[in-house]
Amino acid sequence: MKKMDVLGISLTDYTLREALKLTNEYMNNGALNTVFYISTEILVEAGESPEQKNWLESMDMVVVGETDILRASDNASRNRVHETENNDYIREFLHRLVRGQKTVFLLADNAEGVKKLQNGLLEREPDLQIIGSYSLSEVSGDLDFLINEINDAAPSTIISCLPYPLQPKLIHEQKMRMNAEIWVALLKDWNKNLKKPPFLMRISNNMYRQIFRRRMKNYQTEKAE
């Protein structure tokens, strides 16, 4: 476990072993705990918004999704880099869901996103018990219908793949109304180590990595003065 100050955002990075131990606790403590994947793009945007900063810091656990974040926070040990590059957390998490016969409810921003998320998860774990799904494009007005759908299904796990900053905003505002054990929020390219992201997404990701490195360098210089 290592505390990180990333562009003024206070976060904790966990090794895979520590993260899985915490996950086991989350699934047995009677509350809905949140696990949120972070990227350089998310940190660049949140670094400029006190509200988004608060959203990230309120998550029960963050999972580093890019090795640039580890390097910028002086946490790039060989093991952590390997765990991040191979997306070991989601792999082990899905294994545990199957072994524990846990049920899953999916959230994405549209029907295509739901299908892509479901196919990606089942590609990794064919026996995953997906008992419901919902696309936010179907929501008109308030979120009561969505909340009722999830609570009626009573899944042990919610897995979402939504655009930023919608994803942390939804979690922050609605998690107290959800009946589940754990909510895992994935990055848009969460399946990148199985399937290469589209070209435009790779361009965007590279751009944000460059911006992130530059801002972290400036931030650390100003902090040291």
Image: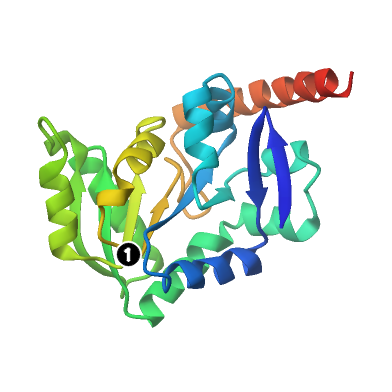
Relative image position of residue 217 (x, y in whole percent): 79, 23
Relative image position of residue 186 (x, y in whole percent): 43, 48
Instruction: Identify the residue at horizontal 12%, vertical 52% (top origin).
Output: 148
Relative image position of residue 43 (x, y in whole percent): 58, 31
Report the side of 178 relative to 6 (left or right).
left
Residues 59 and 106: in front is 59
Q: What residue type is labelled 1?
A: Leu
Check the picture and name the quadrant holding the N terminus. bottom right
The answer to whether residue 134 shows anywhere in this view is yes
Instruction: Identify the residue at horizontal 65%, vertical 49% (top origin).
Output: 12
Mark 1 sits on what residue?
A: 122
Relative image position of residue 133 (x, y in whole percent): 19, 54
Name above or below for residue 9 compared with residue 50.
Answer: below
Residues 101 and 67: in front is 101
The answer to whether residue 202 shows anywhere in this view is no
Label 1 SS: helix
Name above or below for residue 143 compared with residue 179.
Answer: above
Name above or below for residue 34 compared with residue 142.
Answer: below
Report the side of 38 relative to 69 (left or right).
left
Name above or below for residue 40 compared with residue 133.
Answer: above
Instruction: Identify the residue at horizontal 32%, vertical 74% (top origin).
Output: 102
- Local packing at callout 1 (Cα closer than 10 Å; few below 14, some 14-19, many 20+) is some
Report the side of 12 relative to 23 (left or right).
right
Instruction: Identify the residue at horizontal 25%, vertical 60% (top origin).
Output: 179
Check the picture and name the quadrant holding the C terminus. top right
